[in-house]
């Protein structure tokens, strides 16, 4: 009896560790959501045509993509689930008659010249995005906020892997893409300073979840050094960043090429709290930790979105719908405006609290 009581006391003392262990065992056996398989089924890919030459089908529904996936010109599923940082594809993606054309282009300059004068968003997604899934997200970003989009695409999911292994897969691929991302920013900076392509428009950066890892790595490795001291990015938005919150001020205070920097966080974010279990560290997008970066606007979304991880788009078939105040916040900062957060109540963590 005493032995049993001793065992119960030990289990109670280490109940959190035991719970974490059980959750990890459960995650290791979990299969990927059915929505991922649907994004990669043959019926979805048959609606997408990949071309390396020929006519570019211009459309009001279009965006640019920079991708480091492996491409196979003659295959229906032409973009696979592997990242190759030794090469990249520059793509003009347009929707015509309910079908998508993915057309290789020679340069960003060529691609940007195909778009009307609107503000630009350089967009990077997080874990779990197939190539077709990223097409959907870029389309929603462009149409929801009336902006031109350049999406940086990397392999962030592999359907043959478990949830835990996919976490590591996405983490590694985002981190190792940082040099290509730095090259991409250098090209944008050069085009802004030497051409009229961005005249009378603003450029903002939006990185979501694990997409923030490559930006963090780029800054820590000093891989991006602006060619001038001129600010060429209006707003940088680190949305639900799945990066270690510890000492985040060290790399964020090195960002001098943007006018405004925003960190959107939510302490109840169920995906980032799950990521904490897998990585062993609390995420910046969950609950920022002191010391804070003096050049950052911190926005607390907890009261407005509950456990939601993606609160910047209305994703079809999902229950979360943005409130008007949230959509207005993102519309302003994605279109180069500064959000006047001083009209909001201060967060008990840091910064200001977003309301419904």
Image (cartoon, grey):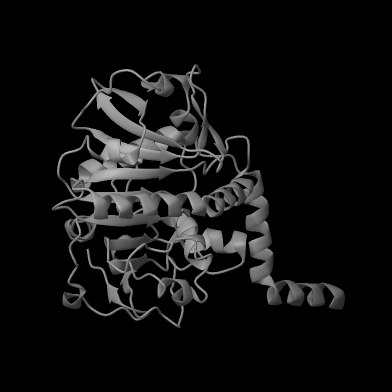
- What residue is rendered at 23% in x and 67% in y? 355
Quadrant in which the N terminus appears: bottom right
- What residue is rendered at 28% in x and 19% in y? 55
- Which residue appears farthest toward the front when viewing the image? 194
Quick one: 295 or 141, which is closer to the camera?
295
- What residue is rendered at 54% in x and 41% in y? 157
Residue 189 found in image quarter: bottom left
Q: How many marks?
A: 0
Quadrant in which the C terminus appears: bottom left
Quick one: 355 or 49, which is closer to the camera?
49
Q: Is residue 315 visible?
A: no
In this picture, is 333 found above or below 165?
Answer: below
Residue 232: percent from left, percent from top: 27, 61
State left or right for residue 182 relative to residue 161: left
State left or right for residue 126 relative to residue 258: right
Q: Is residue 159 visible?
A: yes
Residue 63 found in image quarter: top left
Residue 249 found in image quarter: bottom left
- What residue is rendered at 21% in x and 41% in y? 143
Quick one: 258 or 277, which is closer to the camera?
258
Residue 209: percent from left, percent from top: 44, 56
Residue 240: percent from left, percent from top: 40, 61
State left or right for residue 227 relative to residue 192: right
In this picture, is 343 found above or below 137?
Answer: below
In this picture, is 62 found above or below 263?
Answer: above
Residue 317: percent from left, percent from top: 34, 38
In this picture, is 289 found above or below 155?
Answer: below
């Amino acid at each position: 009896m005493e032995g049993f009581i001793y065992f119960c006391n030990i289990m109670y003392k280490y109940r959190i560790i035991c719970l974490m262990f059980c959750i990890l065992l459960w995650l290791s056996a979990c299969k990927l959501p059915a929505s991922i398989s649907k994004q990669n089924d043959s019926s979805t890919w048959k609606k997408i045509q990949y071309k390396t030459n020929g006519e570019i089908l211009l459309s009001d529904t279009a965006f640019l993509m920079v991708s480091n996936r492996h491409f196979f010109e003659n295959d229906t599923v032409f973009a696979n689930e592997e990242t190759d940082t030794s090469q990249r594809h520059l793509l003009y993606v347009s929707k015509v008659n309910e079908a998508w054309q993915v057309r290789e282009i020679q340069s960003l300059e060529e691609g940007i010249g195909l778009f009307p004068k609107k503000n630009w968003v350089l967009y990077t997604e997080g874990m779990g995005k197939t190539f077709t899934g990223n097409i959907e997200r870029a389309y929603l970003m462009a149409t929801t906020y009336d902006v031109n989009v350049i999406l940086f695409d990397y392999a962030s999911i592999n359907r043959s892997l478990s949830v835990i292994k996919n976490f590591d897969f996405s983490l590694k691929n985002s981190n190792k893409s940082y040099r290509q991302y730095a090259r991409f920013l250098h090209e944008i900076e050069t085009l802004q300073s030497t051409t009229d392509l961005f005249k009378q428009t603003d450029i903002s950066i939006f990185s979501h979840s694990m997409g923030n890892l490559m930006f963090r790595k780029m800054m820590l490795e000093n891989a991006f050094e602006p060619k001038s001291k001129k600010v060429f990015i209006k707003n940088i938005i680190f949305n639900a960043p799945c990066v270690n919150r510890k000492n985040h001020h060290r790399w964020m205070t090195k960002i001098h090429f943007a006018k405004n920097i925003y960190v959107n966080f939510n302490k109840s974010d169920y995906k980032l709290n799950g990521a904490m279990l897998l990585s062993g560290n609390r995420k910046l997008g969950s609950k920022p930790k002191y010391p804070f970066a003096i050049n950052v606007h911190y926005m607390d979304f907890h009261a407005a979105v509950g456990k939601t991880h993606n609160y910047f788009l209305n994703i079809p078939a999902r229950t979360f719908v943005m409130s008007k105040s949230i959509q207005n916040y993102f519309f302003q900062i994605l279109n180069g405006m500064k959000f006047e957060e001083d009209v909001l109540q201060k967060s008990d963590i840091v910064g200001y609290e977003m309301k419904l």
